Image: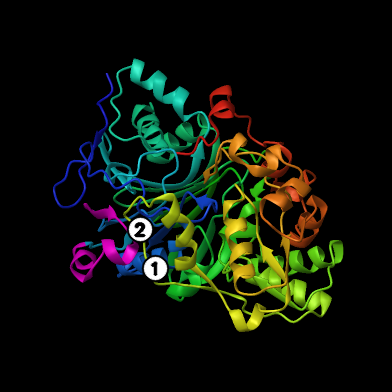
Amino acid sequence: MKRPLQILHAAGGIPQWQGDYFNEGAGRDGVFDKLKEECGVFGVFGHPEAASLTYYGLHALQHRGQESAGICTSDGKKFAYHRGMGLVKEVFDNDHLRSLAGTIAIGHVRYSTSGESKLANAQPLVFKYREGDLAIATNGNLVNAGKIRETLERQGSIFQTTSDTEVVAHLIARSQHNDIVEAVKEALRQVQGAFAFLVLTRNKLIAALDRHGLRPFSLGKLGDAYILASETCAFDTVGGTYVRDLSPGELLVIDENGLREDRFAEMEKRAICSMEYIYFARPDSDIDAINIHSARKRMGRLLAMESFVDADVVTGVPDSSTSAAIGFAEQTGIPYELGLIKNRYTGRTFIEPSQELREQGVKMKLSAVRKVVEGKRVVMIDDSIVRGTTSLRIVNLLREAGANEVHVRICSPPFLNPCFYGIDTPTRKELIASSKSVEEIRQAINADSLYFLSKQGLLDAIGRAHGEWNRGLCTACFDNDYPVPVGEEHASAGCGCD
């Protein structure tokens, strides 16, 4: 009989299965209805300051998750780890980092979606099993995790978190292979969905990307050390250099013998998430050698070519739409101005505001620059419209500041369908574009005109030349063409993340 998997407690002596329930409103943006990424991962092999390096790498990836952060290190003999709820700078101090000895590390920042926001689900998850210590961190979502979990529970497995990551840990522990690499391969062949995995043992670092390459995942170097990250901006932050992106179905093994390239599966339909280019990734990151800022500028240019409007000023909703707004302005010759300013010091809210305060709360996050927009015809560029409530508030903010006209231009197609691959989206019925025409949305957000970038315009702007299917992009949120089939339980529930 297989030895049960034992999940280790979090640093500080709090058992993970008890956890500390985190305020469900904390870390979530109650004012805006923007999409939320699932998380970011960072790994290091062969660096004397692996923990500190991972800390700075996670800082660079903070935009991908703000609810929890964690680091696990190995000195070749034993693990050291610490996790907590909150931002990276809130979870770690100098004492924590000094306690994380070792030259190998994996780190994680998390935003929970349908999974509970509590310490038990903070990653990396750390386990003991028959072959020793094991730590796992992942970015993504497994669409068949529920079915696998149900099967494992019937067979006697005891789960202590609600995270998909623990499902993979149980599959690894139950493998007949004593070799950890083969056990990981066997486990990954059983799961479906989007994932970028980092698996740490006492002397190995294993990285793997799902068969479709839905999530970004890159390999870099810093001197003789190897580094892995969800985005290349993390390499710049720690002084590393980009080597290449992982390919779909690829598995890398890094140990004392160096880097070994392997596969757990052949690449299926290439389908990297288009929202990474539109919204999630930092502008200074590159995905498949395509710079995010440049791609967004092209979105703005093509948006201007498809939907020119005579106006006095162009402004973008900060920060993700700034690049597209610059491209729109350059294409049209209409001046680009900072018509909207983001307040970067509001922090996270731990209260449940009344509707009246929620409406007022947009002004805590954004301010319209009256002297820029007053008396002007304004083109407002944004990356997407989800429920429509944010767009309405921002349009009204500009009108209250004296804008004569507000023309809204969106640098993506209408968002029609929920995501099941690691992005927090509302149910289909909550997505405004799923039930309203463009004209009805225009009226709902109080805009003078509204235009969404065409799907072809989006594909051309991103510029991926390879891939027969959508040039290797997942566009399911726009066209309902999911690269990985989702079950009925997901289709009816909306977001199936985590």
Kind of residue at badge 2 = Thr
Residue located beneath label 2 in the image = 349
Vertical relation: 236 (above or below) 113: below
Q: Residue at x 64, y 49 (%)?
A: 272
State the residue lying farthest toward the top.
154
What is the span of residues highlighted in magenta in the rendered image? 77-99
* Whether residue 465 is visible: no
Vertical relation: 304 (above or below) 412: below
What x and y, as percent, mark residue 139?
Answer: 47, 48
Q: Residue at x 30, y 70 (%)?
A: 49
Quarter occupied by the N terminus: top left
Q: Is residue 212 left or right of residue 411?
A: left
Kind of residue at badge 1 = Thr
Q: Residue at x 62, y 57 (%)?
A: 391
Q: Is residue 62 left or right of residue 389?
A: left
Residue located beneath label 1 in the image = 346
- In this rendered view, identify the residue nearer to me: 322 or 245: 322
